[in-house]
Amino acid sequence: MVGSMPGEWWAFIVLGLCAGVVSGTLGLGAGVVVIPALVLLLEFEQKTAQGTALAVMVPMALVGALRYWRNPQVDLNGLVIALIVLGAIGGTLVGTELAARVPAGVLRKMFAVFLVLVAVRMFTASPTPPQARPEQATGHSAGAEAVPRGDRNDSAAPQ
C-alpha cells in the first residue's frame, strides 16, 4: 500500500508532524499547513487536499482539545464549544456543497486570499482586553461546574 502512495511516504509523516506542532502550538486547523503542502509540494488537486485536511483534523483536534482541556491555565466553556460546533456543522454542509460547485483553481485562489487576509488582520490587530463579566470576578464560566475538566490541578493555577 505504501508503494502505491503519491510522493514519498515519509513526507506524509513529516507533514503530519508539522501540522500537529503548528495546530497544537497556535490552535490552527490542520488545513492551514496540510492544504498548501499537499497542493504545492505533493501535487494534490485542491479539492482532494481539502478533503484530506478535513479528515486529518478530526483526530488532531480531539487530541489537542483534550490537552488544552486538562491545562489549568485554559478556561474552556462547554456551552460556547457546543454552540460553535452547532454552527460549524451547518457551515460545513454549506461549505462542502459550495466547494463541490466551485472550480478547483478558484478554490485555491479563495484559500490563498483568505490566508492573506487573516494573516494581515492578525498581524495588525491590537489585542483588546476582554470586557469584565460577572463570571470573571468569581473565576468561573457559566456552566463550568457541570462540565468535568479532567485531571485539573487547581493547586498549580494562579490564585
Image (cartoon, grey):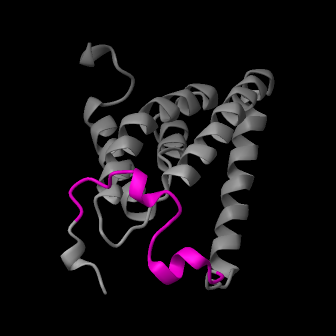
Task: State the residue at coordinates (70%, 26%).
Answer: 93
User: Which stretch is magenta?
Assistant: 131-152
Residue 77 percent location from the top left of the image: 49, 58
How many marks the image carries: the answer is: 0
Task: Give residue 128's quadrant in the image.
Answer: bottom right
Nearest the viewer among 93 and 103 is 93
In the image, is 63 to the left or to the right of 80? left
Quadrant in which the N terminus is drawn:
top left
Task: Give residue 5's quadrant in the image.
Answer: top left
Residue 9 percent location from the top left of the image: 28, 29
Task: Give residue 122's quadrant in the image.
Answer: bottom right
Q: Residue 134: within the magenta?
A: yes
Task: State the residue at coordinates (73%, 36%).
Answer: 107
Residue 98 percent location from the top left of the image: 78, 28
Is residue 117 at least partly visible in the picture?
yes
Nearest the viewer among 82 and 57 is 82
Task: State the residue at coordinates (74%, 54%).
Answer: 113
Q: Is residue 157 above or below residue 11?
A: below
In the image, is 82 to the left or to the right of 25? right
Nearest the viewer among 48 and 9 is 48
What is the magenta segment's predominant secondary structure?
Answer: loop
Q: In this view, does 113 lie above or below 10?
A: below
Q: Residue 64: within the magenta?
A: no
Residue 67 percent location from the top left of the image: 29, 55
In the image, is 128 to the left or to the right of 148? right
